[in-house]
Each structure stands twice: as C-alpha cells, then as structure tokens.
Image: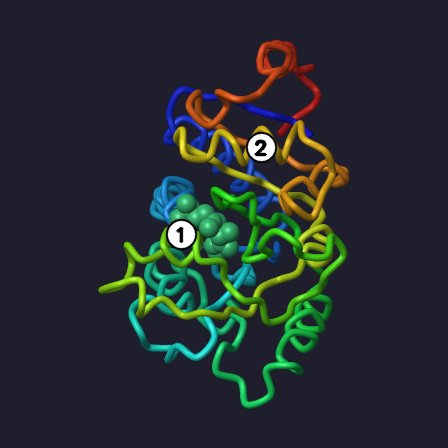
Amino acid sequence: MEIIIGSTAEELAAIAAAAIVRQVDRNPKIVLGLATGSTPRPLYAELARAAAAGTDFRQVQGFALDEYVGIAKDHPESYASVIQREVVLPLSMVRERVHVPDGRAFDLAFAGPQYDADIQAAGGIDIQILGIGRNGHIGFNEPGSSLSSRTRVKTLTNDTRVANARFFASVDEVPTHCLTQGLGTIMDARRVFLFAFGEAKAEAIANALEGPLSASCPGSVLQLHPHATIFVDEQAAAGLTHAEYYRYAYAHKPDWQEL
Ligand code: F6R
C-alpha cells in the first residue's frame, strides 16, 4: 500500500485527480468504480475542473459501489441520483455508461451476480474509488463480511444508518438494506484509491492499514491488494504507528514511479 498523508482533503484530491486524468488521457475508455458519501466529493470536484478544462470523460465507464435497497431510483438520496448529480453531470459523462446496482430489482438475489457479470463484461474496474466507514466498512461491507464476498444484499449496521441519517429527514428513513459490491469484487479492481478525512475516521484507518487482516475491519482486506493507494489527512492519520515512515517513503518516491 502507498499511504499519502496530506494536510487537506483538497490537496489530496488534487493529487488523486491528476493521476486519474493521466490514466483517462492514456485510455479514454477506462472503467472507474465510484463511491458516494461525503468523502469523494473533493475528488469529484477536481475531476469536474479537469472536465471543464478539456479532459474527456465521455467514453469512461462507471460502476457505483452500492445502492440502497427499496429506494426509488429518482429519490434524491438514492445512489443512482447522487452519482448522476455529483459525478455524471459535473464530469460530462454519458449516463448510459454509468451503472448503479438496482436496489429495486424484482430478483435481488440475482441482481448482485448480474452486477459482477456487468463489471466483468466491461473489462473490470481500472480504478476503484473508496471511502471508509467509522466501523471500517468499505462499500457497505459491514463488519463480519466475508473477505471474498461478491456483490450482494447486506443489512446496514445501526452505526451506518445513524451516520447516513444526515442525508435523510430522519434515521427512520434510512433504508435498512443495500446492494453492495463485495470485498472480493473490490479486490478485483486493478487499482484502489481509498480516501479518509477527519478524526472520526482515524480508528478505522489505523485498523484497516495496520491492524490484523480481519472481517471485523473489512477495509483491512486492502492489505492484500497489490496496488492500493490511501489518501488520508493528518486527522485521519492520527492513529497510524508508521506515519513517519509513510511520509518519508512518499517524499522519497523515485521519479520514475508515478502514482
Ligand atoms: C459509499 C460507501 C461507503 C462510504 C462510507 C464513508 O458508496 O460505500 O463505504 O464510503 O460510508 O462515508 P462518508 O464518505 O460519507 O463518510
């Protein structure tokens, strides 16, 4: 894992966006895995600036990480709506090329494997963008998730529903279930960019990056990923034992080794 500690979310988003733009310039048909929530917003804002400056995202494909079960697609807080509002429109992507799991599928048991098959048919995810929950979840793979799980229905923890209540009128309106890419699905991505900002994420980041590999902290599965880059601000990095080494390694990154 490469761990980049920055002073602000904006600074880190600019570094990550530059790397993504470089890849899009090389391969305009790149496949991006798209997280929702507050964390990736600075990154999407940087990518929107790049789009305004001429980077062409029209051939890029996108696969959202997850969707609530039972919520109408046009509900303002469905991840289909959020991805449309925060990613597709600002980056001038083509709506048909951006996929979100169908949380209203008639056959939810089939919708997960179908989503994994769609990702495979697109050639697999080149860069998966991730946030992390306070309980260590990535996607909505809550603690206890199989480290090799595939896209499927999961029950949200109370902690996750409380954390996401800020997007709804009350916690009672937050759906209880979701369709989420599995940890095995996420691990299939060629590259992973995980972002975490603020002290509320410090414990999850310490457990994910330096704790034991464990279903108790689903994000810890990234320790097995061959090409994961972690972008954390000082507050989210506060619990890391080896922070000084990560800073040193990034400062001494060989010139030929691009992000
Ligand atoms: C979002 C997702 C979640 C969030 C996580 C952090 O698609 O799958 O794992 O990344 O809950 O959420 P924020 O960024 O709102 O703190």
Q: Nearer the viewer, residue 217 or 84?
A: 217
Residue 109 visible at all: yes
For the question of whether residue 35 can be seen, the reply is no
Instruction: Tell me how far mark 1 sits from mark 2, CA to CA.
Output: 17 Å
The part of the image, by quadrant, that contains residue 222 is top right
Is residue 234 shown above or below 16? above
Question: In the rendered image of this protein, does residue 164 appear above or below residue 177?
Answer: above
Q: Is residue 179 left or right of residue 78?
A: right
Question: Looking at the image, is 199 positioned above or below residue 143?
Answer: above
Residue at the disc numbered 1: 37
Q: Which mark is residue 23?
A: none
Image quarter of residue 83: bottom left
Q: Amino acid at mark 2?
A: Ile
Q: Is residue 253 above or below residue 99?
A: above
- Extreme residue in the front direction: 158
Residue pointed to by mark 2: 230
Q: Could you tell me the amino acid type at mark 1?
A: Gly
The mark nearer the N terminus, 1 or 2, is 1
Q: Who is closer to the viewer here, 191 or 37?
A: 37
Q: Residue at x 72, y 61 (%)?
A: 149
Name which residue lies at 71% across and 73% down: 117
Residue reaching furthest to the bottom: 106
- Which quarter of the rendering shows the N terminus? top right
Instruction: Name the residue furthest left.
Output: 169
> Where does the image place residue 176, in percent across and percent down from the top left?
45, 69
Instruction: Give percent across and percent down for residue 212.
Output: 72, 34
Is residue 127 shown left or right of residue 92? right
Whether ligand 1 has any atom under 8 Å from the Cβ at mark 1 is answered as yes
